Image: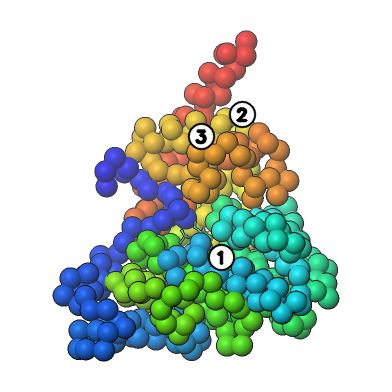
Amino acid sequence: MASTDIYLDHAATTPLAPDVLEAMTPYLTDRFGNPSSIYAAGRETRAGLDRARGMLANSLNCQAREIVFTSGGTEADNLAIKGVAWHHRLRGVGNHIITSAIEHHAVLHSAQFLEQFGFDVTYVKPDHDGLIQPEAVADAIRPDTMLISIMYANNEMGAIQPIAEIGKIAREHGVTMHTDAVQAGGTLDLDVDALSVDLMSLSAHKFYGPKGVGLLYVRRQTPILWQQSGGAQENNHRAGTENVAGIIGMSRALELAEAGRDEENQRLIALRRRLIDGLLGRVSGTRLNGHPEHRLPNNVNISFEDVEGETLLLNLDMHGIAASSGSACTTGSTEPSHVLSALGLKKTQVNGSLRLTLGKSNDEAQVDRTIDVLEESIIRLRRMAAATAD
Ligand code: PLP
């Protein structure tokens, strides 16, 4: 790896698995036919696309035709939220959307976009552990509610939401249910029936697949107005020549992730424990953000008193360690994390937070090195701050 020795930002993205690259390569070279072409080269590509769709449908426990390929999680979220909203606007029924205050910006900004057109949005707040309580969602439902969109797992502090319970509530009220499962792909169960969801977003680059490809699961009969006009691809649901190699890569990546899932999750949970215990035990003034148990196996989010997360990141980078101080999408912006703020953290706690997300390349030695570097950096930074204050 270039100048990063320890990569602890797997929630931002993951490296492409070698087996995934191998599966993709023929579709980037010899098998270049357009899957919509009727001659042999096109049919060959179409066959690969169909196989990938079938494998993904198997993982989601849905039918192949319920999968719509997209350019990633952001497009899938936009399509779900705007698609359902515009369908209702066209029919003049249902004007209210329920989502949460801790969603990814792909969901939050889609909801805010719709507010400009007169849609009403309720942003349900999480409890102090970052969990969205199903009762809070139930309480927000109104006669004109047409969509509930709650993420499966949070990208900043890893909280895993009770989607099956929320999905059941949505179903009882006849409200369409979407979940952004981008952080859950490859790690949590994606059975759309068990989750009681009508729409679900996934993105390949979060589970060792390629960037720029994802999918939206759309249950049959879901009221949705398709957003992209053009050719008849994706059953007339999303126009544009398919990202064939990307889709093949996504299906192989999910297949691989699911085959080794339980073992890898156990390994990550042990590493997570070691990292959390090491940091909370050795560094004073620390706080774990997000639920201690109901969280992604690879997610550690900690606030350190009297230090800036951004300064810590630079220190880590100088030691060849890559991490994040919030979601990658907000890096560079001066806005404090909306997720940690919604948990009720003080601004200083939000600004002193780090997100460390583990993955396949990490081991105990790397975790121990990270703890050593952080302990040393924090002690030094606090000493410097105290000296300047004197
Ligand atoms: N939703 C969540 C929860 C995410 O973490 C991300 C990416 O960070 C996205 C959506 C956007 O996915 P993509 O990068 O594929 O557009």
Q: Residues within 10 Å of mark 2 (few under 14, many from 20)?
A: some
The image's mark for residue 310 is: 3
Q: Nearer the viewer, residue 367 or 40?
A: 40
Q: CA distance from mark 2 to mark 3?
A: 12 Å
The image's mark for residue 306 is: 2
Say if mark 1 contacts mark 3, CB within 8 Å: no
- Check disc 2 and report its element: helix, strand or loop: loop
Name the residue carrying label 1: 78
Q: Quadrant of residue 15?
A: bottom left
Residue at 75% across / 62% down in the picture?
A: 118
Q: Residues within 10 Å of mark 1 (few under 14, many from 20)?
A: many
Residue at 43% across / 50% down in the picture?
A: 9
User: Does residue 254 lie above or below 47 as drawn?
Assistant: above
Q: Amino acid at mark 3?
A: Glu
User: Does residue 30 lie above or below 295 as drawn?
Assistant: below
Q: Quadrant of residue 197?
A: bottom right
User: Does residue 378 lie above or below 322 as drawn?
Assistant: above
Q: Amino acid at mark 2?
A: Asp
